[in-house]
Image (cartoon, rainbow, N blue to C red):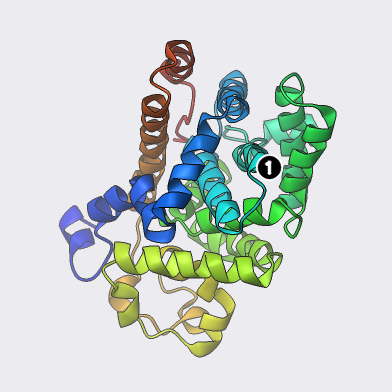
Amino acid sequence: MSDQEQKAGPRLDFERIERIEHDTPLLMSLIFKKETLAAARQVFLDRRTRFAITRLLGYWDEIGGALPSHNFAHAMGTAHFAVCRAIDCKTDPSLLPYIAIAGLFQDSARAYGRSDRMIHSLLGASSYGIKDSVILSVKVMEKRMFDLISDGELKLVGAAMTEPQGKLGRFVYSGDSFELSDPFRNSTIAYENCVSRRQGAMWIISKYHGAMVKKMESLLLDDKIAVAQACWMIGDWAYDFSLRKIDVDRSVTDKIGYCAARGIQTLLLESNGAIHAKVTSMSPMLKLHSNKIRRRCMESMVKKSSIELRRLKELVKDDFTYCETIGNLESRGRLNRKVH
């Protein structure tokens, strides 16, 4: 399929949506008030949060870089949403840095590689599920942060990473669920599995989407509603209200409506019509989504990480040493390596 054919009809306007998805301040401003965003910025200036970021980047650098779909952009997006949501829920301000740290490390155990050799070395297994991933991520956090926060604080952050309905965990899991609706992220995961595990688009439907359902079902009702509303708000705006043109069956809305426009659009496009009867009565013009587009989505996620790093350096530009540390980690060229 040529580039011209890909751009024809009501399919994704990749460049436009990429610009919107990469503009984290814009996305957050559509969801949260200015006062909330201002308070969240202070949390990311906190010494503990700042060191959590460099420790996370340092860990990924040591192991060869995180999977592109579980990269720095995802970690920052999860932490941002979690902190903003916690602020809106009038959480004790002294707890916000721990929410940020938990959000940053919640997917830290993900490792780059054409195979599952890292998983095998850690677990003695060829694959692992969400629960195993969380346990490993908590261990990474404890090893990286033990000299910066107390044992009690480590337990507090660990609980936030493992308890979706906990006092702090509810916000971390809300942020992660919101991030899981990102279409570039979903498409990237499909491409990764096509290349590294010889699977593809259907994997994201049958396996990854199932994980999304479980994660959303674990949320408190108020948090589930907040995530769904945020997704629909971003999706409708980013996709120029295109989802409203898709005739989605009521039963489908009940099952996957929480993914909202961003996630649903990708799931529809990834399906290539193979699950047409089971998922939706979508327009035939929305069925095509090639591996070329998936690869571009992966490259887009890598770029988004670089954008987030630049924004972070701008936020802490008065701390030359800290900015230099971030710059050195990024310049190594090992972070967010592509799976090709």
Q: Quadrant of the N terminus?
A: bottom left
- Residue 193 appears anywhere in the view: yes
Q: Position of residue 266 (x, y in %)?
A: 42, 63
Q: Is 170 left, or right, of 104 in this rendering?
A: right
Q: Which residue is mark 1?
A: 95
- Category of crowding for the residue at label 1, using alpha-carbon neighbours closer than 10 angstroms: few (below 14), some (14–19), many (at least 20): some
Q: Quadrant of the C terminus?
A: top left
- Given residues 59 and 221, the one toward you in this image is 221
Q: Position of residue 115 (x, y in %)?
A: 62, 36
What residue do we see at 63% from left, 42% from top?
A: 96
Q: Position of residue 75 (x, y in %)?
A: 54, 40
On screen, residue 246 above or below 14: below
What residue do we see at 55% from left, 57% from top?
A: 88
Q: Quadrant of residue 314?
A: top left
On screen, residue 49 above or below 265: above
Residue type at mark 1 is Leu
- Given residues 281 and 214, the one toward you in this image is 214
What residue do we see at 60% from left, 57% from top?
A: 174
**Residue sitting at the far bottom:** 250
- Given residues 292 and 307, the one toward you in this image is 307
What residue do we see at 64% from left, 50% from top?
A: 172
Q: Is 54 left, or right, of 306 in this rendering?
A: right
**Residue sitting at the far left:** 4
On screen, residue 199 above or below 59: below
Secondary structure beneath label 1: helix
- Residue 269 appears anywhere in the view: no
Q: Is 239 left, or right, of 78 in this rendering?
A: left
Q: Quadrant of residue 146?
A: top right
Q: Position of residue 136 (x, y in %)?
A: 75, 37
